[in-house]
């Protein structure tokens, strides 16, 4: 650890910058894992996160009055770490989601068959729309990673479909491939 205390100038700024980005990105993903009930993954990431944090903070606070640029570098890296953490989390896409689709009745069965052919579980309910028009409500539960595939299929086959997407905290039963 003394190695970091003896560094100064551009090399120290570089290390602070990238270590802080990594630490905050890990923190963002850790929070998502914990919120999704992935306790072990969240705890492991928390350990890595705090180790990086301790090293980075101690190097920033060391001689801070003589080198205030470290604070600026730290703050920029914190912001970028949040940005990259969200990008990483969206790529990992942990968890489950539910898509609800509202379409005209005659199009509902066709769309449900297309989605089922692609491995999605679909439940259809009948509903009423504006002016008492008969609608089909399609309910699809899926892994978050599959949302782009499902919404693309829906839009390709029914561009007028009304689509909502919600996250699922817990689910029992049903069909998810």
Image: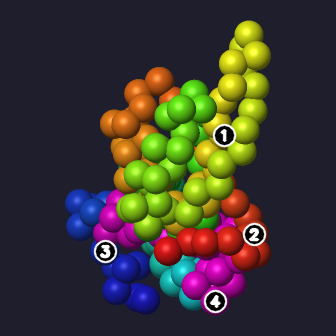
- Say which residue label 2 marks: 170
Mark toward the start of the polypeptide (2 vs 1): 1
Cα distance between the residues tagged 2 and 4: 18 Å
Q: Secondary structure at mark 1?
A: strand
Mark 3 Cα shell of 10 Å, populated few (<14), some (14-19), many (≥20): few
Instruction: Please state the horizontal and vertical placement of residue 106, each as a whole percent of the image.
Output: 53, 32
| Residue 169 image position (x, y, % from top left) | 73, 64
Indicate which disc, 4 or 1, sits on the residue closer to the N terminus.
Answer: 4
Which residues make up the magenta segment? Answer: 15-43
Tell me if label 4 and label 1 are in contact, CB under 8 Å.
no
Q: What residue is shown with label 3? A: 7
Residue position marked by numbered label 1 in the rendering: 137
Query: Residue drawn 57% across and 28% down?
Result: 104
Is the Cβ of the residue at disc 3 closer than 8 Å to that at disc 1? no
- The answer for how far apart the CA atoms under marks 2 and 1 are is 21 Å
* Disc with the residue nearer the chain's start (2 vs 4): 4
- Main structural element of the magenta stretch: helix, strand or loop? helix
Residue 11: x %, y % from top left: 24, 67
Q: Are dots 3 and 4 in contact, CB under 8 Å?
A: no
Q: CA distance from mark 4 to mark 1?
A: 37 Å
Residue drawn at the location 65% of the way across and 55% of the way down:
123
CA distance separating discs 3 and 4: 35 Å
Dot placed on the residue nearer the N-terminal end, 3 or 1: 3
């Amino acid at each position: 650890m003394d190695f970091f205390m003896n560094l100064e100038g551009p090399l120290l700024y570089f290390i602070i910058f990238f270590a802080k980005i990594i630490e905050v990105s890990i923190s963002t993903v850790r929070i998502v894992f914990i919120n999704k009930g992935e306790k072990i993954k969240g705890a492991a990431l928390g350990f890595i996160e705090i180790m990086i944090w301790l090293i980075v903070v101690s190097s920033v606070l060391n001689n801070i009055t003589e080198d205030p640029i470290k604070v600026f570098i730290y703050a920029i890296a914190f912001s970028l770490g949040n940005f990259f953490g969200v990008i990483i989390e969206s790529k990992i896409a942990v968890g489950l989601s539910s898509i609800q689709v509202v379409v005209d009745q005659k199009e509902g069965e066709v769309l449900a068959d297309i989605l089922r052919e692609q491995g999605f579980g679909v439940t259809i309910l009948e509903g009423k729309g504006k002016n008492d028009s008969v609608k089909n409500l399609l309910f699809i539960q899926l892994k978050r990673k599959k949302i782009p595939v499902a919404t693309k299929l829906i839009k390709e086959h029914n561009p007028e479909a009304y689509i909502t997407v919600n996250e699922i905290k817990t689910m029992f039963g049903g069909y998810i491939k």
